[in-house]
Image (spheres, rainbow, N blue to C red):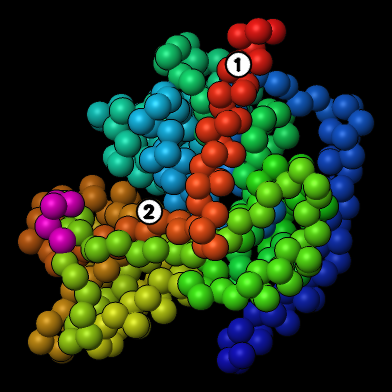
Amino acid sequence: MNLANLTFQSIRFLLLPFALLYGGAVWLRNRMYDKEILKSTSVNLPIICVGNLSVGGTGKSPMVEYLLRLLTPTFQPATLSRGYKRKTKGYALANDHSSALEIGDEPMQFHLKFPAVAVAVGEERIEAIPQLLHDRPDTDVIILDDGFQHRSIKAGLNILLTDYNNLFTRDFFLPTGDLRDERNSYKRAEVIIVTKCIPDLSDKERNEIIAEIKPLPHQQIYFSTIAYGTPYHILNPQHEFKLHKNLEILLVTGIANIDPLKQHILDNSYTYEKITFGDHHIFSIDDLKEINKRFSKLDHEEKIMITTEKDAVRLVKFKEDLENSPLFVLPIRHRILFNEEEQLKETVISFIRNFSQKNKHG
């Protein structure tokens, strides 16, 4: 651990009293929902919630996309997000004129990749869902993006993600740790996915993690790793560029956890530099100038810039400046390990069909 990390961890430890106060407030809120002092509302539609117990990147957006790829051939899914760091408030449905500033970067990413899917945002999900269904009455299932700790809506299928490198079982409340909910809240999930695993995770470690999490009899646990795709130009997805070991890369990111991304770049290039911004950073023209300045200083013969899909939706507004820029976007997906992908897919599809069947005869 370097000095900067050691200092950061020391500061977080000193904030333990605040973490205990925060944890107490979270505990009280959960007990009020458990005792129905605070009410959870059920919706007469299949609701799939994708969430986590911590702040930071556990892979929620790629999991929403995973579900959309699974469901769109058969169903009419919709997504509902809060629209974090957008410049607007209230309910909004993505359209051809939407931007990341209006609906948030992740919803914009969903809209661009799945234009036929209804992508909505709204801070108050209990108010946004009726508006979404009014606008898109053909909706078969709603995917709640990052809604696990927001208990005002009761989802029928909760998919809880936890990072292999930072399991919720080993974490603590903010600001000392990264937890924004109780560890015991995992019991509300039907599916738990350990994300960002090493691709060659052993059966022994898999079983050790399952024993550590202690799933309830009704809970299913899966393990996933990050599968990186071929980078494509930010303005032209058809223009792809394969990484190779004679390449120098400037990595441009504004995401919560860049460690897996850095390792992938390191494994697939000669060398790289990085320029990092805060999570959900809204890029300015000055940021773009700084990025180009840093890139011009790279002295390797073959060089490109790489960014994430989430960052790309916040950079694409500079179309004229990026037209001739060697800025490429690196797509990612979840890959389910241990040959259990079909089982996960069956769980999701069965939930929707059983819900619809039950309502049909109810």
239 is within the stretch colored magenta: yes
Residue 232 lies left or right of residue 124; in this view the side is left
Q: Position of residue 302 (x, y in %)?
A: 12, 82
| Closer-to-camera residue (67/311) | 67
Residue at screen point 45% across, 59% down: 335
At mark 1, the secondary structure is helix
Question: Which residue does the numbered mark 2 point to in the structure image?
Answer: 310
User: For the magenta stretch, what is the residue range?
Assistant: 236-240
Determine the residue positioned at 30% across, 62% down. 229
The part of the image, by quadrant, that contains residue 1 is bottom right
The numbered disc on residue 332 is none
Q: Which residue is mark 1?
A: 357
**Disc 2 residue type (three-letter):** Lys
Q: Is residue 44 left or right of residue 326?
A: right
Lower sequence index among marks 1 and 2: 2
Q: Nearer the viewer, residue 244 or 112?
A: 244
Q: Which of the pair 351/294 is nearer the observer? A: 351
